[in-house]
Amino acid sequence: MPMLTEFGKIFIFLLTAILFVVVAVVAAKLIRPSRPTREKLLTYECGENTEGTPWVKFNIRFYVVALIFLIFDVEVVLLIPWAMVYQSFGFSGYIVGVIFLLLLGLGMAYEWRKGDLEWERPKIVPPVLAEKMNLEKPDQLTPKEISI
Amino acid sequence: MSTWEIVIFTLIKILVIFTIMMLTVSYLVYFERRISAWTQNRLGPNRVGWEGVLQPFADVFKLLLKEDIVPEQAEKKIHSLAPVIALFVAFTTYAVIPIGPSFNFFDYNISLVVADVNMGILYVLALTSLGVYAITLAGWSSGSKYSLLGGIRSSAQMISYEISMGFSVGGVILLSESLRPIAIVESQGLWMWNAWIQPIGFITFLVSAFAETNRLPFDLPEAEPELVGGFHTEYSSMKFAGFFLAEYANMIISSALIITLYLGGYQIPFIDITTLGLAHWFEVLIYITAFFFKMGALLFFFLWVRWTIPRFRYDQLMNLGWKVMFPLALLNIIWVAVLIMVFNL
C-alpha cells in the first residue's frame, strides 16, 4: 500500500499555501476597481518628476557582503553534520570541531583585517574655523580690522 | 491508517494552522497598534466594534477593495510575483513546528505538527533564506529608487544575520543531536532549556530573528524618514497586504522557532505534568496552552522592543552583525562543545 511520507505532507502543505495565496490574489483582482490615470502610474518620487533611471548605481560593499555570506553559509552547512554526530566521537570530535572553527575564525580575522567588514561612512572633518580666521596670527585680528 | 486518512488529517491540520495563523496575524496588527498607542499615551484604534476588536477585519476589507496601482516603470510580472513569494514563504515555514505532543484520538495517534520531518530545522532555515528573494525582487522590480535602495539594504542585512542565525542553531544541534523539532523540544527536558545552557546563542539567535523579520531596531529596509517605505513604496492594495501579512507571519514563525529551539517548546518548567495523574486530553491542552503563552510573551517582547529602541544606522547594523553577533555565535558553539565534554550532558 502506498504510504504518505512526512515530506508528502509538506508537499500537501506547499500546495495548500500556493492555492491560498493565488485565491487571495485573484479574489482581490475580481473585487477591486481599476481606473488608472497617468498620474497614478508615475513612479513615486516625493511629488517631483522622475529623474533618470530608477536602477541607480549602488555601493560595491553590498557585493562584498554577498561574497562573504556565500563563504560562511557554506561553512554553516558543513558544521551541521559535525554537530549532529559530535557526542558519539568524544574528544577526537572535539579536536576536529575546534580546528574547523579556528580556521573559520582565521578566515573571519582575515576579512576583518583586510577591512572588508568596514562599512564606509563620511569622515567627520573637524571644523576649520580656526584656520579660516587665522587665529595663529593674532596680530591680524587687530581691533581696527574687526570693527568695520 | 490508510493513505487517505492521513491526507485528510493533514488537510485538517493545515486548515487549523492557517486559521490560527491568519487570526494571530490580524490580531497581532491590532495589538501592535493598541500597544504602541499605550506606550505613547494615545488611544489607538478603538471605534470598530468593542474597543476596536473588529479593526483587523475592517483593514482587510479596505485593502481588498483598494485599487492596485502598478507603476509604468515597473517590471510587471516580477512586481506581482514578489508579494506572492513573501506570503508563500511565511505560510509554509510553519509546517514543521510542533505546538504540542502527540495524543490519541479514538483509534488514531495524532501528532500536533503537520509534518514531523527528520530535518525540520534545515527546512526552516532554507525557507527563511528564500524570503530574501521576495524583498529583493520587490525592491528591484518596482522601478523606483527608494525601492531599489530598500531592497538592496534588506538583502545585505538579511544574509548577514542569516550567518549568525545558522551558527547559533549549530549550538542547539550539538545538544539535541537531531534536526527534528520534536526531538529538540524533548531533548531540553523539563528545565534544561537551551536558553539557560547557552545564553549567548539564545541572544544571538534572538537578535538575528529581529533582523531577519525586519523589525525595529533593524527595519532599515523600510526606514520611513529616508526611504519613504523602502521595498514596498510602489505597492498598494492586496499586494501591499501580502508584504504586511508576511512580516507579521514571520514574527510569529520566528517566535515559534525561538520557543522550539531555546525555550523548551510546549513544556512547562519544573512541573512534570505527566505525574499529576490528569486526564490525557487535559495534559495535551496544558501543553498547547503553555506553547501559546510563551508565544504571546515573545510576541509582546517583539512589540515592546519596537516601541522602545530607536533604529540603527546602517554601518552600525552591519558592524553588529559581522563583528559582534558572528564571533559570539562561534564562541557559543565552542562553549556548548566544552560543556558536553566536561559534563557529559
Image (cartoon, rainbow, N blue to C red):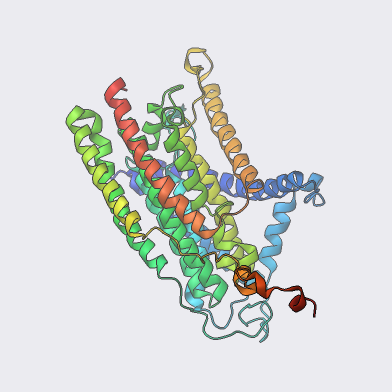
Depth order, front residue of A139/B9: A139
**x 41%, y 49%: residue:** B323
Depth order, front residue of B156/B86: B156
In the rendered image, residue B170, in percent from the top left (x then y), is placed at 34, 40
Quarter of the picture holding the N terminus of chain B: top left
Quarter of the picture holding the C terminus of chain B: top left
Q: Is residue A88 left or right of residue B103?
A: left
In the rendered image, residue B115, in percent from the top left (x then y), is placed at 40, 42
In the rendered image, residue A50, in percent from the top left (x then y), is placed at 60, 84
Residue farthest to the front, as pictured: A139
In the rendered image, residue A9, in percent from the top left (x then y), is placed at 38, 47
Depth order, front residue of B110/A84: A84
Image quarter for residue B117? top left
Depth order, front residue of B227/B118: B227
Q: Is residue A123 above or below residue B308?
A: below
What is the tally of numbered marks visible in this picture?
A: 0
Image quarter for residue A124? bottom right
**x 52%, y 24%: residue:** B268
Q: Is residue B80 visible?
A: no
**x 57%, y 56%: residue:** B219
